Image: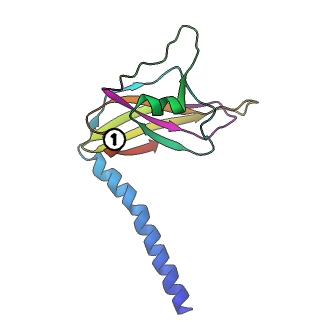
Amino acid sequence: MKKTLILFLSMTTLILLCCQCAPSQLRQARKGATEAPYQVLENYYVRNNVDCSKLQRLIIDNEQDFNGYFGPAAIMGGLPTDINWQKQYVIAVLLPQTNRPTMVTPLEVKQSPGNIIFEYRVNRGNKTSYKLVPFAAIALNRSADPQQLQVFFIEK
């Protein structure tokens, strides 16, 4: 009984400590963070070979990886947003496939040295007979190696 109680308390303490790491890192990243200019990527779709069973948060720094996730959407009168891979990289959030029309809207992007904070809103509609993969993707100017940045994705 005593060993079980000690094990339970140890596990509870460990879980609580782990949960505190991310919020404190986010608080630290917010200190001195400034608005980061970004460009919303429009007229793209998520390719049907992408596993859309779970939430995905992506940092993409080259065209080949980007094309593995996204394709240009054929929309009358609208061209896909151009991305200059020499000067920009992409941050994207892909929600699980759903039968509800869903809009993922970027709200704010802030940066501090080594950190990016990407806040977005999700609005869900009523059930439909079709399925889709909701996502938001933005292009940011390169100031460092994107794979070395810590990115915080925050749903509002």
Q: Tell me what residue is drawn at x 49 percent, y 21 percent.
A: 42
The image shows residue 84 at horizontal and vertical percentages of 35, 22
The one nearer the camera, 90 or 4, is 90
Is residue 4 in sight in this rendering? yes
Question: How many marks on residues?
Answer: 1
Q: Secondary structure at mark 1?
A: strand
- Location of the N terminus by quadrant is bottom right
For residue 146, above or below residue 37: below
Q: Tell me what residue is drawn at x 44 percent, y 74 percent.
A: 13
Figure colour scheme: rainbow
Q: Which residue is mark 1?
A: 116
The image shows residue 89 at horizontal and vertical percentages of 37, 31
- Type of amino acid under label 1: Ile
Is residue 104 in sight in this rendering? no
As drawn, the residue found furthest toward the top would be 77
* Crowdedness near tag 1: few (<14), some (14–19) or many (≥20) residues, C-alpha within 10 Å: many
Q: Tell me what residue is drawn at x 35 percent, y 43 percent.
A: 147
Residue 75 located left or right of residue 65: right
Query: Magenta residues, as a range?
Result: 85-104
For residue 137, above or below residue 57: above
Q: Tell me the quarter of the picture where residue 115 sits.
A: top left
The image shows residue 144 at horizontal and vertical percentages of 26, 38
The image shows residue 16 at horizontal and vertical percentages of 44, 68
Q: Tell me the quarter of the picture where residue 146 sits.
A: top left
Magenta highlight on residue 97: yes
As drawn, the residue found furthest toward the front would be 64
Q: Tell me what residue is drawn at x 33 percent, y 54 percent.
A: 25
Magenta highlight on residue 46: no
As drawn, the residue found furthest toward the right would be 129
